[in-house]
Image: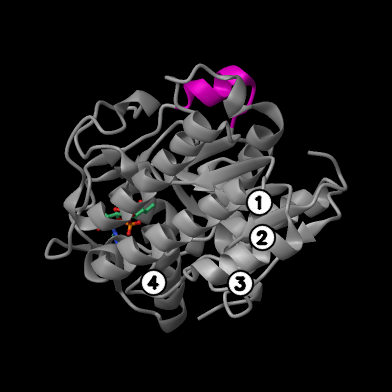
């Protein structure tokens, strides 16, 4: 990939896609092709094919997806599987048909079995039952990994996958029902401080462990993989897939404490055990990526402070 290469970032309005665009622009890539969902509905095969035939991108970052937190995944189960399957199938097939040189597909740590050994290694894929709250989304993301692998093995396409842990950062979703835990807690604690509320309610028991990666680190890892690895030079039986994470996790209760401290909250934290906990732990084993020479650089506390400072200036809710 050189600075003039034509690069399509699918999902550039989302948290991950926008971070990839920021990173590409900062690195001097000048030929980006971008379409928002109104301009190009990635669920529409004909529209996707026409777009690829017209624009002929050389490189594709497939960051477009329907995403959400535990409750959104559990509630909109049909939308999560249908929309993600359609987006992946259409984009990956069009990338093959229109001879894209390289494609990077973004998955999720929820593709691993609920009770897989921790930290989660790439080889745990398809070794057990999934976490029920996000099974439809996880199956769609597993299908995306398999699409990349199948087009690589049948047609020699250089299609690779990256599996991010839970992400946060600029352009996150702060809807209290649909968002992930970190943005939800930032909003809840900031609102409580402003209103002088004495308590904040955190879903579940607070015991689940999660790993959180700043999306700028994720974008850096995506560029690194795009430049560094080639699926076509790997043995056919080796999956061209890399976990991307911070390498350490934190309980939801401790995350709430940390966000409480950062926001200056002095009241009490209540846990609502009627809400689902989800998978007990989801820590990525990042040694495969580390062996190539990449590791995360933004600590959780620094990352949250950065997001908090941005929210003090501009609040999306
Ligand atoms: O981030 P989250 O929604 O998703 O929830 P998952 C993580 C944990 O935080 C769960 C708890 O144990 C939640 O019960 N939690 C506490 C809260 N308070 C809140 C709150 O106010 N909002 C939310 N959302 N959670 C998602 C998957 O799983 O992670 C997706 O459903 C995807 O498929 C994504 O993989 C990265 O980590 O449980």
Q: CA distance from mark 2 to mark 1?
A: 6 Å
The reply to whether dot 3 and dot 4 touch (C-beta < 8 Å) is: no
Looking at this view, is 93 or 294 the one in front?
93
Q: Earlier in the sequence, mark 1 or mark 3?
A: 1
The local crowd at label 2, few if under 14, some if 14 to 19, many if 20 or more residues have their Cα within 10 Å, is: some
The picture places residue 140, in percent across and down from the top left corner, at: 34, 53
Distance from mark 4 CB to nearest ligand 1 atom below 8 Å: yes
The local crowd at label 1, few if under 14, some if 14 to 19, many if 20 or more residues have their Cα within 10 Å, is: some
The disc label shown at residue 188, or none: 4
Q: Secondary structure at mark 1?
A: loop
On screen, residue 106 above or below 56: above
Q: Which is in the foreground here, disc 2 or disc 4?
A: 2
Q: According to the image, label 1 marks what residue? A: 98
The picture places residue 16, in percent across and down from the top left corner, at: 57, 56
Q: CA distance from mark 2 to mark 4?
A: 42 Å
Q: According to the image, label 3 marks what residue? A: 312
Residues drawn in magenta: 286-295
In the visual, does 289 lie left or right of 278? right
């Amino acid at each position: 990939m050189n600075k003039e290469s034509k690069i399509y970032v699918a999902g550039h309005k989302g948290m991950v896609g926008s971070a990839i665009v920021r990173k590409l622009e900062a690195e001097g890539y000048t030929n980006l092709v971008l379409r928002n969902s109104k301009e190009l509905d990635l669920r529409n095969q004909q529209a996707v094919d026409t777009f690829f035939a017209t624009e002929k991108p050389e490189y594709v970052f497939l960051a477009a997806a329907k995403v959400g937190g535990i409750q959104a995944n559990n509630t909109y189960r049909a939308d999560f599987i249908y929309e993600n399957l359609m987006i992946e199938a259409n984009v990956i097939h069009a990338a093959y048909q229109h001879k894209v040189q390289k494609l990077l597909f973004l998955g999720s740590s929820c593709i691993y079995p609920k009770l897989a050994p921790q930290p989660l290694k790439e080889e745990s894929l398809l070794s057990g039952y999934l976490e029920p709250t996000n099974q439809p989304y996880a199956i769609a993301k597993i299908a995306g990994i398999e699409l990349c692998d199948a087009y690589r093995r049948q047609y020699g396409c250089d299609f690779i996958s990256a599996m991010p842990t839970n992400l946060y950062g600029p352009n996150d979703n702060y809807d209290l029902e649909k968002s992930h835990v970190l943005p939800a807690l930032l909003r809840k604690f900031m609102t409580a401080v402003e209103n002088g509320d004495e308590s904040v309610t955190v879903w579940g028991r607070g015991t689940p462990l999660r790993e959180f990666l700043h999306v700028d680190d994720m974008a850096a890892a995506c560029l690194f993989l795009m430049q560094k690895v080639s699926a076509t030079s790997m043995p056919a039986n080796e999956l061209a897939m890399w976990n991307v994470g911070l390498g350490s996790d934190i309980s939801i209760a401790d995350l709430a404490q940390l966000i409480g401290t950062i926001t200056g909250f002095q009241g009490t934290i209540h846990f609502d055990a009627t809400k689902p906990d989800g998978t007990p732990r989801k820590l990525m084993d990042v040694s495969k990526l580390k062996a190539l020479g990449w590791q995360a650089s933004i600590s959780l506390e620094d990352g949250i402070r950065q997001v908090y400072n941005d929210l003090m200036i501009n609040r999306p809710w």
